[in-house]
Amino acid sequence: MSGDYTGRNTGDAIGHATISNSEVNHWLIENIFSYNRSFGKHTIDFTGLYSSQKDYTFTNTLNANTFINDLTNFYNVGSAQIQQTASSYTQSTLLSQMVRINYSYAGKYLLTATARRDGFSGFSAAHKYGTFPSVALAWNVNEESFLKGISSISQLKLRASYGISGNQGVSSYNTLTTLGSTQYIYGSTTTVGLVPSAIGNGNLKWESTKGLNIGLDFSILRDRITGSIDAYDTKTYNLLLSRKIPYITGYTTILDNIGKTANKGIELSITSRNIRGTNFSWETNVNFSANRNKLVQLYGDNKDDITNNLFLGKQLYAVYDYKLIGIWQKGDDFTVDPSAKPGDLKFADLNGDGKINTADRTYLGSRLPKYIAGMTNTFRYKNFTLSAFIQTFQGALKPNPIYDYRDQAGRINLPAGIGYWTAANQSNTRPSLSYSNSRQYTYPVSGSYTRIKDVTLSYNFPKQMLEGLKIANLQVYASGRNIATFSKWLGWDPETDFYSYAANQGSSFYPLVATAVLGINITLQ
């Protein structure tokens, strides 16, 4: 239950109160059957699963306003002149069956086969269930006789898997056409009627992903270097997307299975034990991930959906805008952009029609990174431990409208060092302070950054010092987070997605801050 009241002290002249009650229930029943048997060099393991779950939420709300004073507030909403009630109920169920078989021969050759069937109440009877099979193979190469004598290789495992996974991706009632209530005047009285709320789609089905993964696990040089490498190729089809429909239908959008995407990528994780001494050790862990995706199919008409920022053959989270080629200077030929003046942004005439208009906008890149990576170095000297984590995010193109504010209405004050265009400083990268940006250019720039994310120094007291104090472990530490960020990004925080400037860099947004912590961990005997 929650209650809220705003009154005269906050500038509300009549007073508004809200009381909300909600009941949320979730239950899950799982029945698991397993069987295992070994005979000779063969080992087989069988697992069966039957699972059922149900979720439902009931909410009721009372809104009231026009209180005679602020003394009663939401404790006595009956004293308000106007009262309104609302309630809602949602329910969904999910039914799942799964069979998995694991087979191993001499610990060298491994096979896993899985079949899963899921049913979701949000789909119509014809498409309620989806079946998702998968198979995985592994080969422990280090168990082969030709590697037994090579002590520098302690693990070498090749893996491959292929399968289909599902995502229901819809709410409980997306397949149903629903109505909402509204008040209207009938004759001389006010009454309640029903109006169309959302259009359902009984043909909705499970969103599915076919994926191939090939991997390698290794440990070499007597476990001084360990790690894994994975490469994957996935295709997601029957994408659940909202598409626009003619307004004459009474609705503007409908949810449908209308798209297909493809993803390729590589993931790498390596741990190196650089120094292993009696009193001193140094360990490094590096992880790297690179992904490329593209939209393969959309709506079936082979056309881009510019309104929803979807482009066939291009990455998702697209940046679609004019191509900036500089700043208009005195003496330039303004034929293609007669309204421009010196100091304005200069855009490319991409379609060659001799004028700059919306037809010259183009796909510039994606807000998704080309790769992300991180590195952790851990140093230990006797009872001291120093750990430092550095992360990097590279290759993303992000709109940054902060360039367009220029102290507008006192909201932001950028330093003069940015170098805006003036008659004396004829910059070719920054417009003049008087530029109005009538074309709503979003200023896409690099969102890459490297950040010292965490540094921690700790000391563990020797156990013999703690024996008489009835303390099992005692550790003191000093830690710093977000210590330094290296980026060309202008603004508060390059880690945040700035696609929506107002939401992420306005007064309600609070960026990451650098923090320092001193602490102590005590474990009593």
Image (spheres, rainbow, N blue to C red):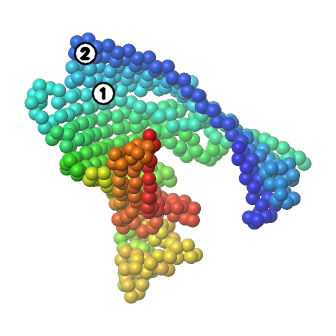
Given the image, on which type of amino acid does mark 1 rest? Ala
Q: Residue furthest front?
A: 468
Tell me, yes or no, if residue 501 can be seen here: no
Q: Residue at x 66, y 44 (%)?
A: 250
Write down the quadrant of residue 432 in the picture. Answer: bottom left
Q: Residue at x 54, y 23 (%)?
A: 29
The disc placed on residue 281 is none
Q: Is residue 83 left or right of residue 358?
A: right
Q: Secondary structure at mark 2?
A: strand
Above-or-below relation of 458 to 131: below
Crowd around label 2: few <14 · some 14–19 · many ≥20 (10 Å) = few
Write down the quadrant of residue 154 in the picture. Answer: top left
Closer to the eye: label 2 or 1: 2
Tell me, yes or no, if residue 48 can be seen here: yes
- Mark 2 = which residue? 42
Q: Secondary structure at mark 1?
A: strand
Q: Are marks 2 and 1 in contact (CB under 8 Å)?
A: no
Q: Residue at x 44, y 22 (%)?
A: 98
Where residue 59 appears, x then y in whole percent?
70, 39
- Mark 1 = which residue? 136
Q: Nearer the viewer, residue 324 or 433?
A: 433
Number of labelled discs?
Answer: 2
Q: Residue furthest right?
A: 188
Given the image, on which type of amino acid does mark 2 rest? His
Where residue 138 appears, x then y in whole percent?
25, 28
Above-or-below relation of 47 to 515: above
Above-or-below relation of 475 to 327: above
Where residue 33 appears, x then y in whole percent?
44, 17
Q: Earlier in the sequence, mark 2 or mark 1?
A: 2
